[in-house]
Amino acid sequence: MAAQAYHTARIGDLERDDGWAPIRAALDVRAFGVNAWTAHEAGTTLIPPHDEAPSGHEELFVVTAGHARFTVGEDEIDSPAGEVVFVRDPAVSRAAVAVEADTTVVSVGATAGRAFRPRSWEVNRDVIPLLDAGRHAEAREILLEALERYEDRETVLYNLACAEAQLGQTDAAFRHLGEAFRLRPALADHVDEDPDLEPLRADPRFAELTRTE
């Protein structure tokens, strides 16, 4: 049977409690990233300050309702409904806040000339609150299922190691933590501050893994 040719959805129906509507994940969009962000109070952050240097994505924003104010690099851009803001340079910082209540911004991103793969912030956005709440088994199941889905799997591996450490799955935690550090050595800079890794600290492998030359 042929796959369905199209899907429809309303942003409001996809919206989560934090204002994120995960359009890409909900509709299984595979060619580009697309999400919506809604702020129901004026002054609320819509797009937190960030750049796309790790992904190389160009990013386009469309204000579909309300009124936003973007900051791109050093520039502020007044953006009422209908405004389009396109950030071509992945290294430039961008952010947006709502000027009016009930403001919605749709964001679209991908890397020019390269096949799209989703980024792990999608799953980490859900998993980190689970880790903070002590729901480590639930977080582990989500992360295991997501392990091969994302382009930047190092943070998935790191968070998986955190969950496994708390569950007493020490060997698996060290294995996944080592792989995360191999893919992104800078992650090792934060282990001393991470309470989820506390069960590993007395093990000699921890000092060996986090040792800097």
Image (cartoon, helix red, strand yellow):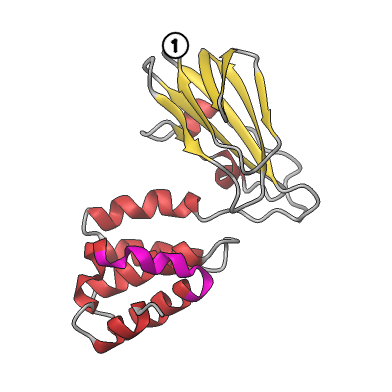
Spot occupied by residue 170 in the image (x, y as percentages of width and height): 28, 82
- In which image quadrant can residue 175 be found? bottom left
Q: Residue at x 36, y 17 (%)?
A: 41
Q: Extreme right residue here?
A: 113
Q: Name the residue under label 1.
A: 100
Q: What element carries label 1?
A: loop
Q: Is residue 39 left or right of residue 71?
A: left
Q: Which residue is drawn at 68% across and 39% down?
A: 89
In this view, the residue in front, 75 or 160, is: 75
Q: Which stretch is magenta?
A: 182-192
Q: Residue at x 41, y 48 (%)?
A: 125
In this view, the residue in front, 93 or 197, is: 93
Q: Main secondary structure of the magenta part?
A: helix
In this view, the residue in front, 54 or 135, is: 54
How many numbered marks are there? 1
Give the residue type at disc 1: Glu
- In which image quadrant can residue 110 be found? top right
Q: Extreme bottom residue here?
A: 204
Q: In this view, does 173 lie above or below 5?
A: below
Instruction: Point out the image quarter for the C terminus.
Output: bottom left
Q: Is residue 18 left or right of residue 180?
A: left
Spot occupied by residue 80 in the image (x, y as percentages of width and height): 58, 11
Instruction: Point out the image quarter for the N terminus.
Output: bottom right
Spot occupied by residue 105 in the image (x, y as percentages of width and height): 55, 25
Q: In this view, does 50 lie to the left or right of 82?
A: left
Spot occupied by residue 23 in the image (x, y as percentages of width and height): 57, 39
Q: In this view, does 197 lie above or below 152?
A: below
10 Å crowding of disc 1: few (<14), some (14-19), many (20+): some
Was residue 101 drawn as part of the magenta stretch in this picture? no
